[in-house]
Amino acid sequence: MRVTSAQAAKLLRKLNEELRALQLKESNSSSFVAAIQEDIESVRPAYNFKEMRDEQNELEKKIRKVKHAINVFNTVTIIPDFDITIDEMLVYMPQLNSKVALLSKMRDAMPKVRVNTGYSSGGTIIDYKYANYDIEEVSRNYNELSDILSKAQTALDLVNNTVEFDIDI
């Protein structure tokens, strides 16, 4: 079966939902309660242990194959313009996000801010907190990293939605 990474992720989600539904069905039908005066066979839910195990095992096997195929695809597929694999990109993007978040705070800082010391001594000393960096330089760096992050996200989305690979299920 040829799929894109996006399609494989949807297939994986579907298989996991099917497995959860089977597990819930088993939980609800593997035992039951009946009153002593009831005909037990008339209230017994349909349940076959071996068939249930076989169905769940088959779904788990498919899930393993899909996850493995995605993992292999992620470790060998290079993102154009970045010259790194998808796997590396999935580490790089959170790093970029963290840097962009930090630079956003630094970019929005005031060069000089009055500090509230938390006590009122009635004195005339006023404390100030100063930015110890060039806010304009931080702003430029923020814009550069934001652009790189945006390009990385777009490049990853493009590969995930267009490049196909095989899953043997």
Image (cartoon, rainbow, N blue to C red):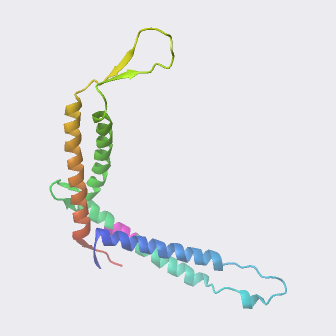
Determine whether, in the image, residue 65 is placed left or right of residue 78.
right
Above/below status of 126 relative to 77 = above
* Magenta-tinted stretch: 64-69
Outermost residue toward the top in this view: 123
**Residue 113 painted magenta:** no
Residue at the (25%, 26%) spot, across then down: 133
Relative to 168, residue 144 above or below: above
Query: Residue 74: where, in percent of width, then height?
Result: 28, 61
Residue 65 appears anywhere in the view: no
For the N terminus, give its image quadrant. bottom left
x, y percent for residue 54? 52, 81
Predominant secondary structure in magenta? helix
For this view, does 82 lie left or right of residue 132?
Answer: left
Q: Nearer the viewer, residue 80 or 115?
A: 115
The percent coordinates of residue 53 (x first, y second) are 55, 78
Classify residue 85 by image quadrant. Answer: bottom left
